[in-house]
Image (cartoon, rainbow, N blue to C red):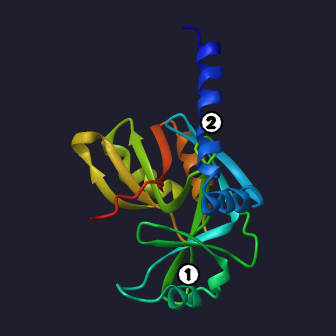
Amino acid sequence: MNSWILGVCLMFMNAAFLQEKAKNPEESKRIEFLNAQVRGKQFTVEKETYQHLSQVFAVRQIGTGKQLQETLSIVGASLDSFVETKGQFLVYRGSQINPVASLALAGNSVVYPMVLNTRTGATGVLLGTLVVTPKRMADVAAIASDHGLEVEREFSHLKVVFYRVKNNADVIDAATALSGDARVEKAYPEILENPVVPN
């Protein structure tokens, strides 16, 4: 089957999938909300295209059994701004637009930027880490130093390194800069899109 026919088939399947999801009133409301959001930079990870949601953020829930409002109040958000949960994270609409996909601090809590998978409509949390495949593991520390990153985890046997981006630094820009480094084979932001929820 040629790629054009396959592409058309996938487009129709995706449209049918989104129509089915839209039959659910809550999902329809969510899709309408996400479509109305300001979108920023676009990037690709493993053939999936993501776009930064400039006014949607996530914060990790504080402790277990804490009320939704209590967690949101730490970042100055109201219950009305709540969008959804994403694993241990609460996703909410901020009061201001932030064109930079960066981590920020609100009290003792970290505020994470959000992205949208443009194919599936699923949201994802940008965790502030970059998944990098260096050409030589001997360059790991030098790459971190040259790009102002911190080595978070290193898996030599897999030739994969996780770098931490500093607060207020754009995660998407950092991944783009690493991708252009001659010492790097591949680099992309780590995204929490489909968290595993324990039973």
Q: Which residue lies at the image location 52% right of the left edge and 61% below the top edge? A: 125
Counting residues from the start of the chain, the first of labels 1 and 2 encountered is 2
Q: Work out which residue is located at the far top of the displayed protein and give it.
A: 1
* Distance (Cα) linking label 1 and label 2: 40 Å
| Residue hosting label 2 | 16
Helix, strand or loop at mark 1 = strand
Is 111 above or below relative to 87?
Answer: below
Q: Position of residue 115 (x, y in %)?
A: 60, 56
Q: Which residue lies at the image location 69% right of the left edge and 76% below the top edge? A: 94
Of residues 196 and 95, the one nearer the viewer is 196
| Residue hosting label 1 | 105
Is 197 above or below relative to 18?
Answer: below
Q: Which residue lies at the image location 53% right of the left edge and 60% below the top edge? A: 126
Question: From this viewpoint, is residue 147 visible?
Answer: yes
Look at the image and tell me in which quarter the N terminus lies: top right
Residue 183, picture quadrant: top left
Of residues 162 and 79, the one nearer the viewer is 79
Is 23 above or below relative to 78?
Answer: above
Q: Is residue 171 left or right of residue 89?
A: right
Helix, strand or loop at mark 2 = helix
Q: Which dot, 1 or 2, sits closer to the camera?
A: 2
Q: Is residue 62 left or right of residue 182?
A: left
Q: Position of residue 128 (x, y in %)?
A: 50, 63
Check disc 2 and give the amino acid type: Ala
Q: Position of residue 79 (x, y in %)?
A: 62, 84
